[in-house]
Structures are given as structure tokens and as C-alpha cells.
Amino acid sequence: MTYYIGADHAGIDIKAYVKELFEKKGHEVIDLGPNTKDRVDYPDFAAKVCQEVLANEGSKGILICGSGIGMSMAANKFDGIRAALCHNEYSAKMAREHNDANVICLGERVSGYGMVEAIVDAWCKASFEGGRHTKRVEKINNLFGSCRA
């Protein structure tokens, strides 16, 4: 599996940790930056990751900022992206199983290293259940055009 990872300046440390966790699991991780703690704008990195996930079928994305909120809001602006902000294992598991999340968002200032590892493990082990959830995910996907005022 290929994962695209990006962060802002407030997510650099956890980004390196998460990248290592995924690589240890045998996944390819493509780091889209940044690589320093110089102040950057999270929407720019959310866009880079989401564009790659959309362009590369079957890939997934990982976005990290201080809280995870900004990244998740920016990511969900992309048609076809289902980004889930996860602060615990249960939300990560449900994001994959029920919502077919293709991007996970994490908050470096919210979740410590141990919790991040548990979140990543839960998200990686889970897979979309389909069934009754398929119709709901299709409805989410179809909301894009209908929500514009």
C-alpha cells in the first residue's frame, strides 16, 4: 500500500514518527513535506496529499497538524476524499470500516506518541465493511456538488 503523508509546522515531529511506523509495517510512504518547522499553511499540504491520493487509485493519505482539525477541513474540500480526524483507536477503526476513509488526520498537540501508534495500528488493520455502509459512503460522495450555495 502506498501512503502519502504531509503536515504543517505543528505536525513535523509526529509526521516523522508516523512515517516510520508505516514503513515498519512494509508500506511505501511518500513524504510531501514540509521538512522543517518553519511556519507553513496547512491547506497547501492537505492539497498535495489529497491530489496524490486521488491520482493514485488504492493509495491513502495521512495529514498532521497541531489539532488535526484544519487538515481534516481542508482535505474534505476535495471531491472523492473522505478524511477522518481520529483521536483514538475506535474512531480510526470506524473511519475505515464504516466510512471508507481514505485520509486520516492527526493532531500532534492532541495525541501523544503512544496514542498515535494505536490510532495508526487500528486504521491499518481495519478495512471497509461495505454492505449497508456502501450506500452511505455513496451518499457522502454525492454531496459535493449539492452543498455549494
Image (tube, rainbow, N blue to C red):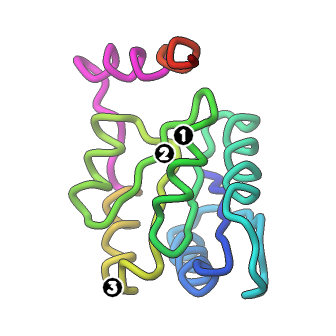
Q: Are the residues at dot 2 and dot 1 in contact (C-beta closer than 8 Å)?
A: yes
Q: Residue at x 77, y 74 (%)?
A: 34
Q: Give the percent coordinates (x, y) of residue 64.
A: 55, 68
Residue 33 sits above or below residue 114 on the image: above
Q: Give the percent coordinates (x, y) of residue 146.
A: 52, 12
Residue 79 sits above or below residue 31 on the image: above
Q: Residue at x 59, y 52 (%)?
A: 61
Mark 2 → mark 1, Cα distance in angstroms: 6 Å
Q: Give the percent coordinates (x, y) of residue 67.
A: 45, 70
Indicate yes or no whether the magenta region holds residue 124.
no
Which quadrant, please, contains the C terminus?
A: top right
Q: Residue at x 58, y 78 (%)?
A: 11
- The residue tagged 2 is 83
Q: Residue at x 65, y 53 (%)?
A: 2
Mark 2 or 1, nearer chain start = 1
- The residue tagged 1 is 76
Q: Amino acid at mark 1?
A: Asn
Say what secondary structure mark 1 lies in.
loop
Q: Amino acid at mark 3?
A: Gly
Q: Which residues are magenta?
A: 125-141
Q: Amino acid at mark 2?
A: Ala
Residue 119 sits above or below residue 21 on the image: above
Say what secondary structure mark 2 lies in.
strand
Mark 3 or 2, nearer chain start = 2
Say what secondary structure mark 3 lies in.
helix
Residue 95 location, quadrant: top left
Please tell me the numbered disc located at residue 22: none
- The residue tagged 3 is 114
Task: Name the side, left or right, on which 85 lies relative to 90.
Answer: right
- Foreground: disc 3 or disc 1: 1
